[in-house]
Amino acid sequence: RDLHSFPTRRSSDLRLHGKSTILNNLCLSIATSTDFNSLYLTLEEHRDRVFVNLLNCFARIPLGRNNREIIRKELRGICTREELDGTKYSVKEKRDYLSFLENNKNQSEYLARKTEFAKLIEDSHRINIQSPNMDIDSMIDYLAHMKRKHNIGVVFVDYAQLLRVAERSNFRSRGDEIKYIMDRLKDFSNDEKNGLPVVLAAQFNRDVRYVRDMALNKIGEGCNLEFYADTILLGFYCFRNPQTDDPVERDRINKIQGTKEYNDKVLYVRLDKES
């Protein structure tokens, strides 16, 4: 059994995060290419939003200026111009969605992919999305229960810094809490009877603004993931042309792409817009 971690930080565009992008792609890859059922625990966003993100990733069809917003409108059942006119969306949003409604080819391809995706979620239960509100001990019991009930083969958790202990726990600091949480996850992943591989997303500290700042000791709240995880992917976005980027940043990106560090435990991964 393994505990895997995927800390990320944005580069060049400070508004974007890559941890959920990595989880979504891994989850869909396992669901479509293996016999394992996946459990996706989202502690940050509502499960409906994760559903939209996974569907967008699965469809891989350009629908307009904002794929996810178009998918949300479509899932709400807006099918005609008249229904769209009755909403409070902005003029730009309405124009974007109207283009989607009038593009029969893209719409047909998307609806076909949505049907395939629904089979993964609803019919075969290959992906189970949950938004649990529980402490780490209750969560471990829940994971063992879900393994027995739905034949789960892997667990995705988004994300590490939102995991918590019971309210009445007597820990002196958040660092002690994090250590306990990581110990519990590692013990669970190594349990031969009830355990599962755990894929755990995490964030870097806020002072990590560029790729050159990325280091394991800057993962938020001192998770010490290098001591617990069997594999660590450090993901980063880089949308601008590397030729015009800051020279120090560009050299760092060129150096680390596809490279491994820390006894081959850590791999750097570049995320693009289409990821």
Image (cartoon, grey):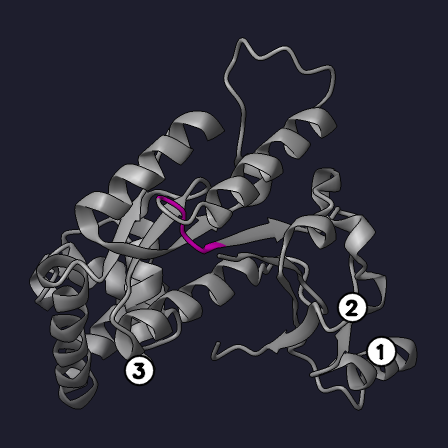
Measure how far apart labels 3 and 2 are at the Cα level. Answer: 29 Å
Residue highlighted by disc 3: 61
Q: Residue at x 9, y 66 (%)?
A: 79
Residue highlighted by disc 2: 211
Q: Which mark is residue 62?
A: none
Q: Which residues are magenta?
A: 194-198
**In the structure shown, which secondary structural element does the residue marked by tag 3 occupy?**
loop
Say left or right for 164 vs 244. Answer: left
| Foreground of the two, 160 or 252 | 160
Say left or right for 93 vs 24. Answer: left
Q: Is residue 177 above or below residue 57?
A: above
Q: Is residue 141 a member of the stretch shown in magenta? A: no
Between circles 1 and 3, the one closer to the viewer is: 1
Say left or right for 27 vs 126. Answer: right
Judged by its main secondary structure, the magenta piece is loop
Q: Amino acid at mark 1?
A: Arg
Residue highlighted by disc 1: 252
Q: Amino acid at mark 3?
A: Ile
Q: Cβ–Cβ below 8 Å for labels 2 and 1?
A: yes
